[in-house]
Each structure stands twice: as structure tokens, then as C-alpha cells.
Amino acid sequence: MNIAFFQSITSYYVDMHNYLHDKLNFRIYYIYKNFLNHNTEELSKSLNFKPGYLSQKSKNSFRFNELVKIIKENSPKNIITIEYSLLTLQLIIIKYLYRFDYKIIVRTDDSMDMLNHSLTLKHSLAKKIMSPFVDDFILCDKAVCNYYQTKMSKGAYFPIIRDEQKLLKDLDKAQSAGEELIIKNNLQNKKIIIFVGRLVPVKNIGAIFKAINRIDRDDFIVTIIGDGELRKELETEAKDSKHRIIFTGNLTGIDLLAWYKIAHALILPSWQEAFGAVVNEAMVANCIPIVSKRAGSINLIEDGKNGYIFDPNDDAALAKAIETVLDIAETEKSKRNLMSITFDECANNIKNIVQ
């Protein structure tokens, strides 16, 4: 038996959690029953198992006795835990205090940009204290994985991706909903560019508006999918745009997949992004990604081949990338899946460190 602790059920991690349960004999525990507006009730239907839940406290709560009880009940060989958190620290202390022999595996979303520029003093200190006691790591950034392997001879690469075979089937189910969106929103003969995410400052959504105002053609529209504190401000700003901008609010399930199905490009312009799961989802839908160099998901992109990478400070570079994509969008959309790696290939990386 093995144990894994995760924050909550999320659409982009369901396939990984099912793999851990089905293939590697992990029992999954979640900290939160609801997290960041994810439709937990609907997502739970996608799980192949009944998860356990920790007592409903904050992520960094003290749960020493509760964790000891879970470990004694399951006698795990491996425990996957979250980041350099208080939960991880407690698992380290429990292991040595009770002389358990389980392997501690930390899953971290750190990108190279975060390692080089953005780690807080608290995060850096926690990493320095805990790293020597961690047996291995699951890393979503390939460059970070190479760094860990060089520095500590540890690390398995598993980007935040879904099982493409399952996702392609779900996308096919969204076909009719996508066709309805085209009619409902009068999108015939238009190339569709989407943003998917929270409407918050770090996402740098204003860069999209600045970039498209540099473009003198009328064969495209932009759809902003998501919600957040900046929505009213962005809607006001969009009224002055040269181009049509649609706001949908937060979407999940078929409603979101329908937009991926009809979209030609996705822009992720974030100032900082640990990964950006939407990039994988877009690529499987053959929606060309245009991604900030500050996002960990650039590891999925071969610049100029299956997507484009740009400096989030450079509106002109973003505009150029958008125009390039618009020129090839129809041809590329007729293909199927821009991903160059598969879910199974990445899953084998985890398999190799837990055996």
C-alpha cells in the first residue's frame, strides 16, 4: 500500500490520481473538499476510487496525530506529499520519530523562473531544511527536474497533463456544443483566440488587449474564459478595443471543452505561472498555445513548431505571434493533438521512483 496527499480534486490531476490508485496501489487523501471553485461533486464522478479526506483545516494546520493514525492503518511503502509544506514537515518528523521506513516523495510545482527569482524567504528556508530528508521528487517543470537530478540525483518529471486518449474522447463529445457556440455568438468565418484562467493581476490579461490593438485585420475574435477580481475592469477596457472580446465567466466540463474544440489559439500571458494546465488541454484540442516564458508549461512547447513562447513584457512580440498563428490556424486546427509527449510516458517516470 502507498499513500498520496493532495490539496483537492482538480480536472487536470484526475487522470494522475486514477493512475496512482489503479496502477501503483496508492490510497488518495485530499485536504480540501472544495478548492478554488472546482466543481468537486462533478469531478468526483471521474475518480476510480473513494478518496479519504483530512480533517477540514487549512493546508498548513498541525495534524500530527491524524497523520500517525493514517500511516499506522496503511503501512505505506511510499508517501507522496505536497510541496515543502507543514504537512511534509510532519511526515518527515513522524517517519524518524516512529522509525517508519516509508519513502517520502514531494510533488512540487516550482518552475525555473520561480527558483531563480520568485521564491519567498519562507519557501527557500523550508526547501533548504526539508530537501535532505526527502527521498524523491515529482516535478512538473523539465528544467527543474534536470536541476534536481544534477544537484541531488533525485527527481521524476511529470508535467500537469491529462490522459490525452480520455481527453480526446471528451472533446469529441463537446463537438455539438462547440457548433452551437459558433452559431450563438456569430463566430462563423472567425478565428477564435481564447484565454482560460482566473482574472487576476498575475495573469497579465491586459497584455492580450494591447497586443490585439496592434493588429490590423478583422478575421478573429478573443474570448476570455474565467472570473475574478479584475472582471469588471477588463470588461470596461474591452469596450475600447479595436476587436471583439467575449467574456464567458467561469466554465467547466463540456462548456469549457466546447470552446477548446472550436478555438484556434490559446494565450497564457502570465507574469508568473508555476505551470498552466490549460496549455496541455489546449494542445490536445489542437489549439495553438502562445505562452509567456514565465510559465512552466513552456516545457511542452517547441517554439515555432507546436506553439509559441514570448516575453510577457513585450506586447509587440505577442502581437507578432498572434498574427503568425492566425495565418496558419485553419490548417493546424485540422490536425489532432499538438502534444509531443504522452501521459503514459510521464506516468512511467513516477512508476520508476515508487518501486
Image: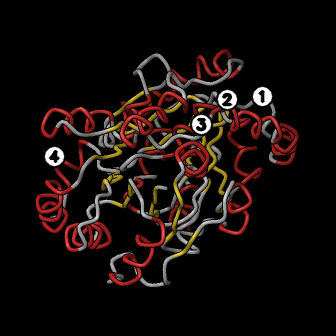
Q: Secondary structure at mark 2?
A: loop
Residue at the image point whose x is 58% and y is 62% from the top: 9
Location of residue 146 in the rendering, given as x and y in whole percent from the top left corner: 24, 32
Closer to the camera in the image, 268 or 210? 268
Amino acid on which disc 4 is placed: Asn
Give the alpha-carbon distance from disc 3 to disc 4, as whole Å: 28 Å
Mark 3 or mark 4: name the one nearer the start of the chain. Answer: 4
Give the alpha-carbon distance from disc 4 to disc 1, as whole Å: 44 Å
Pointer 2: what residue?
Answer: 219
Q: Is residue 218 visible?
A: no
Give the alpha-carbon distance from disc 2 to disc 4, as whole Å: 40 Å
Q: Left or right: 355 with respect to 174?
A: left
Q: Quadrant of residue 83?
A: bottom left
Mark 1 or mark 3: name the one nearer the start of the chain. Answer: 1
Q: Left or right: 100 with respect to 243?
A: left
- Do tag 2 and tag 4 residues touch (Cβ < 8 Å)? no
Which label is found at residue 189? 1
Pointer 3: what residue?
Answer: 282
Q: Secondary structure at mark 3?
A: helix
Amino acid on which disc 1 is placed: Asn
Mark 3 or mark 2: name the one nearer the start of the chain. Answer: 2
Q: As displayed, is residue 211 above or below residue 184? A: above
Q: Secondary structure at mark 4?
A: helix
Which label is found at residue 265? none
Residue at the image point whose x is 64% and y is 30% from the top: 264
Q: Is residue 311 visible?
A: yes
- Do tag 1 and tag 2 residues touch (Cβ < 8 Å)? yes
Which label is found at residue 116? 4
Location of residue 196 in the rendering, given as x and y in whole percent from the top left corner: 57, 50
Q: As displayed, is residue 227 above or below residue 334? A: below
Give the alpha-carbon distance from disc 3 to disc 2, as whole Å: 21 Å
Q: Quadrant of residue 100?
A: bottom left
